[in-house]
Image (cartoon, rainbow, N blue to C red):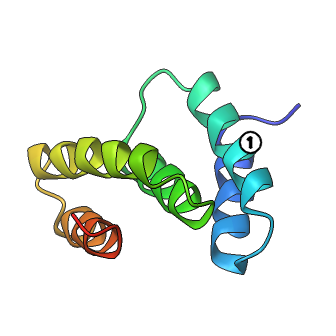
Amino acid sequence: GPDYNDYYAAAQYQMEAGKEYDKGLTWINKAIEVTDEVTWWDLRVKAILLMELGRKEEARKLANEGFMMAQNVKRAFGISEFKKILKKLGS
């Protein structure tokens, strides 16, 4: 059956395709459910999907959490991505 990588790839595809964000959210939730450790890139995808679905408060909360995670592991790409998300959300 599908594993974390399959679910994550499906969620990322939906996010990047700009279609069916609700399906993408389902897939990223499955990925998070089956992994032993949630990462900043999981939170990035989920925050973007939530933002696109108009669920701004949830997106903002995850983006702040992901930003802190990316800062803790010193990932410049993650930090800049979360800054972009938070800017779009007006935070």
Measured along the vertical axis of the image, is residue 17 above or below residue 50? below
Spot occupied by residue 41 in the image (x, y as percentages of width and height) = 41, 53
x 71%, y 68%: residue: 13
Spot occupied by residue 64 in the image (x, y as percentages of width and height) = 24, 48
x 21%, y 42%: residue: 69
Nearer to the camera, 42 or 23? 23
Measured along the vertical axis of the image, is residue 77 above or below residue 65? below
Position of 48 compared to 30: left or right? left
Spot occupied by residue 6 in the image (x, y as percentages of width and height) = 74, 47
- The N terminus, quarter of image: top right
Position of 11 compared to 91: left or right? right
x 34%, y 68%: residue: 85
x 48%, y 21%: residue: 36
Q: Secondary structure at mark 1?
A: helix
Nearer to the camera, 49 or 75? 49
> Which residue is labeled 1 in the image?
26
Nearer to the camera, 27 or 88? 88
